[in-house]
Structures are given as C-alpha cells and as structure tokens.
Amino acid sequence: MITDKEFTLRLIRQLTQALEKLILDKPEESLMQKELDFETLMKDIFKFDFTTLSSKTKEEIIGIVNERQERDHKDYYEMLGNLFYFNGKASGNKDFLDKAKTFYELYLQTSGIFALPIINRINELKN
C-alpha cells in the first residue's frame, strides 16, 4: 500500500521531471502531453497553489520543507528550484529566479550530488 508520503514524493519527482523537460526545451513532451495538471500537483504536494507558494518568502518555503522528512528535502529543493526557474524564465520575475538559485543551492547541499546542469543554472542566475 502506498503511503501518503510516498505518493507525495512520487508527485514531486513527476513534477521535477516534467519541469526539467520544459526547462531543457524538449517540445515533444510537455505538462499537458503528460496529462499533468500543474495546479492539481501543487495542491497535492503543498495543499495550496503556485500563487500562494510564490507569495511566501524563501525562509517560509524552507520552513515548509523542513516540516517534511529530512531524507526528502533534496527532492523538494530540486523541484522548487525547477519550479521557480521555469516560472521565473517564463515571466521574467527576478524574485522567482532568486528563489530558484536559493533552492538549487540547497539541493546541491542536501543531496551531495555534483549536478552540472544545476550548477550551470546557478551560475547563469548569478550573472
């Protein structure tokens, strides 16, 4: 039986992969083609929509992640980085891009993974 935490983690990974494809500009697959409803996923993961999430400060969002199991933090940070990066690039919102940089840095710290695409995005956001 799938527990609520496992289900949420699966949704996070699904959203992360879909956002990665959009960020990498792979038009053959999109959120719509994968039949992913962005807002529904946001509500399933966070219990509120992206507008509510994006209105929170970085510290508030980090607090939300810290309420989850520590082993899952890296997945949340990667997904949040992709989420704010994609939306920041699409809208030109500098606050979103700043949040993306922060969450990508936290992802690298918590995962211990050397992820060159993430490092390249961080460097791009710094410039």
Image: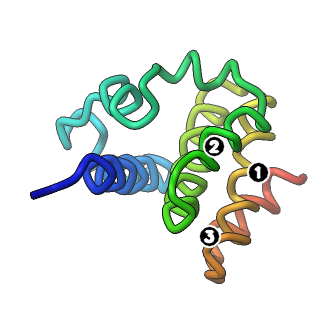
Task: Tell me the kind of residue under disc 1.
Answer: Lys
Earlier residue among tags 2 and 1: 2
Q: How is the image coloured?
A: rainbow
Task: Tell me the kind of residue under disc 3.
Answer: Pro
State the residue at coordinates (39%, 50%).
12
Left or right: 106 as drawn, with respect to 9: right
The residue pinned by badge 2 equals 85
Left or right: 123 as drawn, with respect to 76: right
Earlier residue among tags 1 and 3: 1
State the residue at coordinates (57%, 59%).
73
Image quarter for residue 70? bottom right
Q: Residue 117 bears which disc, if any?
A: 3
> The residue tagged with tag 2: helix, strand or loop?
helix
The residue pinned by badge 1 equals 101
Distance in Å between CA atoms under marks 2 and 1: 8 Å
Mark 1 or mark 3: which is in front? 1
Contact (Cβ within 8 Å) of mark 3 with mark 2 = no
Image quarter for residue 95? top right
